[in-house]
Image (spheres, rainbow, N blue to C red):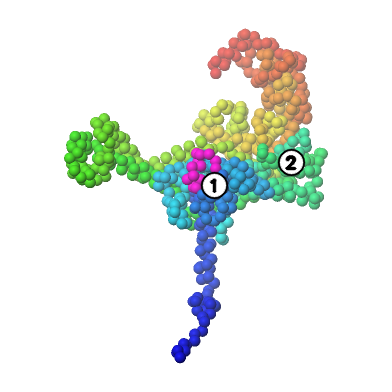
Amino acid sequence: MPKKQKETKKPVLGSAYIKDAGLVVQQPITETLMENYMPYAMSVIISRALPEIDGFKPAHRKLLYTMYQMGLLTGPRTKSANVVGQTMKLNPHGDQTIYETMVRLAKGNESLLHPYVDSKGNFGKAYSRDMAYAASRYTEVKLEKIAGELFKDIGKDTVDFVPNYDNTMTEPTLFPATFPSILVNSNVGIAVSMASSICPFNLAEVCETTVQLLKNPDFDVAETLKGPDFPGGGFLLYNPDEFRKVCETGRGSLRVRGRYQYDKGSNCIEITEIPPTTTVEVIIDKIIDLVKSGKVREISDIRDETDLSGLKIAIELKRGTDPDKLMTRLFKMTPLEDSYSCNFNVLIDGAPRVLGAKGILLEWIEFRRKCVARRVKFDLKKAEDKLHLLQGLGKILLDIDKAIRIVRETEDEDEVVPNLMMGFGIDETQAEYVAEIKLRHLNRQYILDRLEETKELENSIAEMRDILESPRKISKIIITELQEVAKKYGQPRKTLFIYADEEEDGGEEEEIPDYPVHLFVTAEGYFKKILPQSLRMSSAQKLKEGDEIRLEVESTNRAELLFFTDKCQVYKAKAADFAETKASVMGDYIPSRLGFDEGEKLAAAVVTADYKGDILFFFQNGKVSKVPLSAYETKTNRRKLQKAYSDKSPLAAVCVPAEGEEYVLTSGQKRKLIFNPAMIAVKATRDNQGVAVMTLKKNGFVEKVEPLTENTFVNPSRYRTKTLPAAGAIVREEDLGQQLTLDGEE
């Protein structure tokens, strides 16, 4: 009988095959967090949610770099699905998340102030909750031109490259962007225990601010960085203290308000711009709730009229509704006015840091300095290598025949290079270069041309070494690049300003400091308030090309300002609302500062200290309206008044006459008439049509209005009249000659 084997118990799965399986092991919660939770948290913070100094998260960078490698910077558009598939070589997190990243970077989505992806097809809209984007197989993309600034000189060792997840290719850790893209486009991310929310700024303002910081690190960025510039436009309720806090600390809250216009014909408010924190559907739903609850009774209908031309919410009003008062209530009760919370949390050298706008720009400058220095070192190395080869070539100039003889008489090919090294005293690299020269190039002229190139290389190498030793020269290179980017891609500001102090009821005039100032208004709508001592130091006015000074007044800081527009409206402000400036700057742009309507232009400006006296409106149809200035005085601090003057005829001029002052009206038929304001009566209504002063022929119009001076006419009585209206008189040669002489003297 065979020996009975010893029975063994069958191992229980988990207890014998897996060590310590099934055992409950006590572990401190701190160890669990350190071993299991912290790696996840760090991965989200460093590799997912927070942007780095180049302005991108890893997902953005992988997508854009893939498109760059595909040649989409200059080539035609390709299907989005193609790009998504190629990007998965760098980003293995799924095609849908890659495509969502592309959507937010695309021009069609309108999320970014300067989109990096040129798109064709439906990419949805950032301002709409329900407008879904099309699938990737239906849309097409390529890179926008500005994306070229992200990859400039990326092949010259400007940034580090690392292997992708399977070591089959490499990708950049950062982009060597030539402008601070971190502040130009918005970036929002939620990490673990921290978040980031960076608002966009105007490209030209960011570049100018960076240039000033390169020249002076102590520069106050608030002087040139006026405020956020959102892609959806709207108005920023500007609070200087809050914005300065954002610039210095990176944290703060900014109020953004939508933009609207009133269509008088259809009695309808059209909202065309909304804050970036909300959507069209949220606003409409909130207004409908207010109407249903009875809190708002002035609205008869509301609808979304957004189409290919852009966003539009139409609100039909009941008869007799004041649109401005209604919108003031809606701003308070709906997301039409909302807060944008700033939290400038950026990864700097792999560590999250909350920095102000100035701190971010200073960090970007240091990053860009390294990129430029690495690029110069790369070019220097190539130039030195080429110079080394040409120096070896130069030595055979001494005896070309000797070089040919060495090659010809060498029996073994492997001995050609060593023989050339011994024959001319050159190293192996130079000898290899000489040995590979074509026979047709072994002539004196070819070698002389190469020696001439040697001199240029030596000068270039000396210059590059000088750049590497001089931080100032590196700064100059960065400044030049920033100015080029601003000139090439800069665009007008989309978000305009409403100053916070203008929204509050004032009346504390006694607290406004009173001192003499000179006030200037230009034809294009720029305003300057300059102190007399500053004007004495420099009186040369900086103006936009083609612009001119239309109004120059010596007044005080307590003066009231009336800005009349071509839409028969007047915008009120105070001289104290504006900061003192210098003649060497362009000044404040009034349409932006006071929030003019779309397409509205400045027609005239008036300065008054007490609203005493009268104002004259000269119309092209020959009529003149005389209105008391007190008609524009309001008890509350209202910023805009409608029906400021008659809309029956275009304005020819607006004047505030001094005592005894007369005016010369010139018609299109070159007739002139001297007009004394005392000849017409004052009318209390602002938009009265006026009194007929100058009789005009068919299709005639008042061309010009000027104050009468001693030198205007030789015989002024010829152009005066006792009754109105009058046609005026044709200019005599003696008066015409006098005027031409005066113009020539000017």
Q: Pinpoint residue 429: horizontal percent, then vertical percent.
A: 26, 45
Residue type highlighted by circle 1: Asn
In terms of image quadrants, where is residue 598?
A: top right
Q: Residue at x 47, y 89 (%)?
A: 4
Q: Pinpoint residue 310: horizontal percent, then vertical percent.
A: 66, 40
Q: Do the residues labelled 1 and 2 touch (CB within 8 Å)?
A: no
Does the stretch in magenta take in 74? yes
Of 366 and 387, which appears nearest the observer?
A: 387
Which element type, helix, strand or loop, lies under badge 2? Answer: strand
Of 232 and 635, which appears nearest the observer?
A: 232
Q: Which residue is drawn at 18% across and 37% down?
A: 405
Q: Residue 82 carries which label?
A: 1
Location of the N terminus by quadrant is: bottom left
Q: Which mark is residue 314?
A: 2
Residue range highlighted in magenta: 65-78
Location of the C terminus by quadrant is: top right
Q: Pinpoint residue 603: horizontal percent, then vertical percent.
A: 66, 29
Please, is residue 176 above or below residue 532 in the view?
below
Q: Pinpoint residue 701: horizontal percent, then vertical percent.
A: 70, 18
